[in-house]
Image (cartoon, grey):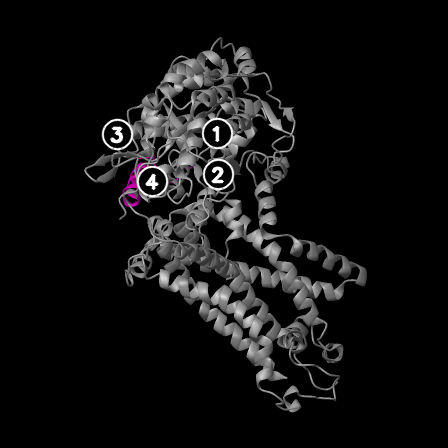
Amino acid sequence: MSVVESPATRRTGGSTPHRAPGHAHRPRRRGRQSAATPWLLAIPTLILLAGLLGYPLIRMIVLSFQNMRLRELLSGRTPPWVGFDNYTKVLGDSVFWTVVGRTVLFTVVCVIVSVLIGLGIALLMRRVARGVRLLMIVAMMFVWALPQLVAAQIFRWITDSDFGVLNYLIDKLPGVNYQNHSWFVNPWQGWSVITTLVVWAGIPFLAITLNAGLTQVPKELIEAATVDGATPWQVLRNITLPILKPLITIVTTLSVIWDFGLFTQNWALRDGHPEPQFQTLATYSYTQAFGQSRYSLGSAISVITVLLMLGVMAFYIRQMFKIGEVD
Amino acid sequence: MKRKLVAVAALAATLLGAAACGSNDDDSPTTSASGPVDGKGKTLKVWLMVDAQSAWKGVVDDASKRFTDATGAQVTVEYQQWANHLTKLDATLAGSDVPDVVELGNTEFPKYVFSSAFAAINPGDYENSGTWLQGLKGACDFEGKTYCVPYYAGARVLIYRTDLFKSAGIAAAPKSYDEFLADADKLQAAKKSDSKFGAVYMPGQYWYSAMSWVKSTGGDIAKQDGDKWVGQLSQPASVQGLQRWVDLAKKYSKADPTKNENDQANIFAQGEAGMFYGNAWELGAAEQIKKDPNDPNSPLVDTKVKGKLAAAPMPEVPSFLGGSNLGVTEKSQNKELAAAWIKAFTDSTSMAGLIKANALPNATALLDKAATDNPAIAPAALAAKSSWFPPNAEKWADVEKGNILQTMLTDVLTGKKSVADGAKWADDQINTTLNES
């Protein structure tokens, strides 16, 4: 094996059948028996996507240019058209921009922390004995399998000011009084709890994926580098990480997309009525639309959110194509 | 992103339903409950809140049976949870397969009445309609017509530990607010060694309580001025009451300033507080809990405070009159049957059943009878006589949903804002919300 290949190629380039090195069969060589076949195969998916995503998306965009309130919803009358009113209202509202800033900050912190810890655990998994590695994977699978809502509910109990085990344990420390301490008075503390929950729940995917990527780093390269006197840090920086880069880019982008849409965790931890300082874009638009029956305003917020996300999405999709081309 | 799309899909589904049905006539005739209706082969769909299932299911079944005997129609009752029941209702009412009778909290009604969700009824058809509690009926009135029927009420009272009162040397329930504070001092002093103990359990986002204190000094939440609503919390009388409540909570309560009153009975049952301010039925909820909270037929288990609780009216503090009303939905295909069911469910027979189940009846004429028939609710019945209710504004539900008062209370209790600043902020928010076109 003389050519270093991207590990991500094997893992994510699903449509590319990967043969043993030396037999480089390219799929495009198989010719074009029928250009329509892929489309035919994709039709069921496309119909589903159009019905479940496309139509609602269009309705949402239309709705954001109307003014639908409860009265219109119940009567079925067409809501009055208001042009860009909802957008001017949202974009001119300082509360909205605070929420955007908070969501972005949370996303940045959460993604950095979870990717770093995920990578750390993945590297650790390569070092430990087989049995321990298996144990780690099983443990992480459990975390992964836990529904978000259940995990959030458990964290809510852990941090409860009256019954929570966290206060109980901290209170056991000598000289510390944490009885009835409320974790959500100070937004920084509250957000630490939420971040911990999101990072904790996000690590299994990151660690297991990155671990799979690490198995593809050729041992020979590392051995050669070590023989040449490279320190472990240099090996990591100059060999492992470059090989892992495409995969890291993808999991980071995915994390950004997931964390930016944070809803379940802060919603459940704040018992279904998050205070202003615990609102993110998703909960904010939900509260506006469904809590206060400002369906059109909520739609406008959602459209803006989608536009904000589009940049990240475009980056993600470009990376996906890039990786496909490397092979 | 996934979350977003789900929300979008849900919204779209709602809209899809909305598009499917025709528009309603604004001048729909008043629905009568008095005429004979033949309901053979028809089934009435009723949405009640979960309280009816857990506390007075017998009353519901009995009323339904009498209704079926009289009309021949069947009844299916679906019990709803309070959390997010409005979201579910909105989505359902936007469609065409709607429940015929819907229960909503009295403060939730005006928004729906204004949005033409309910049909007008004729109050004269219902027993005791002459003395319906104003706090419930007010939510039903719109432009000279009545759109719902008062169902039951709840008033808040002082619930206290008799054993702790005794050991602190307090003979009886406080008769004045000063006495109440003095008792709190005594309780606190008697349990000085217990750092978890708070004389009064008062969660920070318990706005029904805080606003009762505002009313106790002559303050108000909002007033109507012409066709505009004006927030009143920053008026001196309101600030005084708010300050009184904040002082109380800060000095005597160990409760979480970011919690609301939903689980106060359970927390009080842990035995770490001497008094709390709650609905009359919360006394029972603190003394006994269901072994399995998800099973309505689960056996009850005694808590630490079983047999140690008593209730009294909170001295000098008018109670918030909570409660529920029943409405006939505008889209119902069986309006007259629906009205007839409500009539059976709110008549004197049903009200007697509710009184037995520790709920307050829907009319002042029945309050005295309630106090004598069931000593357990006598303090609440008394409290209901001097009670208040939130502004009867179309958008009031949005103030509640927008967490305006709750946020303000937490901010003030934790020192993030002064009482005056918090009140000013809340007034601004209330003005914007209530007057939004």
Residue A179: image x %, image y %? 56, 33
How packed mark 3 is, by other alpha carbons closer than 10 Å (few <14, some 14-19, many 20 or more), is some
Q: Residue at x 38, y 33 (%)?
A: B106
Give the side of residue B103 with respect to residue A46, left or right: left
**Are the residues under badges 2 and 1 in a single subunit?**
yes
The mark nearer the N terminus, 1 or 4, is 1
The magenta-colored residue range is B413-433
The secondary structure that most of the magenta stretch takes on is: helix
Which residue, given by chain and number where applicable, does mark 3 sit on?
B236
How packed mark 2 is, by other alpha carbons closer than 10 Å (few <14, some 14-19, many 20 or more), is many
Amino acid on which the number 4 mark rests in the picture: Val
Which residue, given by chain and number where applicable, does mark 4 sit on?
B113
**Are the residues under badges 1 and 3 in a single subunit?**
yes
Give the side of residue B326 with respect to residue B60, left or right: left
Q: CA distance from mark 1 to mark 4?
A: 26 Å
Amino acid on which the number 3 mark rests in the picture: Pro
Quick one: B39 or A211, which is closer to the camera? Answer: B39
The question of residue B431 being in magenta is answered with yes
Quadrant of the rendered image containing residue A130: bottom right
Which chain does tag 4 point to? B
The mark nearer the N terminus, 3 or 4, is 4
Quick one: B219 or A222, which is closer to the camera? Answer: B219
Give the side of residue B337 with respect to residue A94, left or right: right
Tell me whether circle 3 and circle 2 mark residues in contact (CB < 8 Å).
Answer: no
Give above or below for A47 relative to B7.
below
Q: Residue at x 61, y 90 (%)?
A: A32
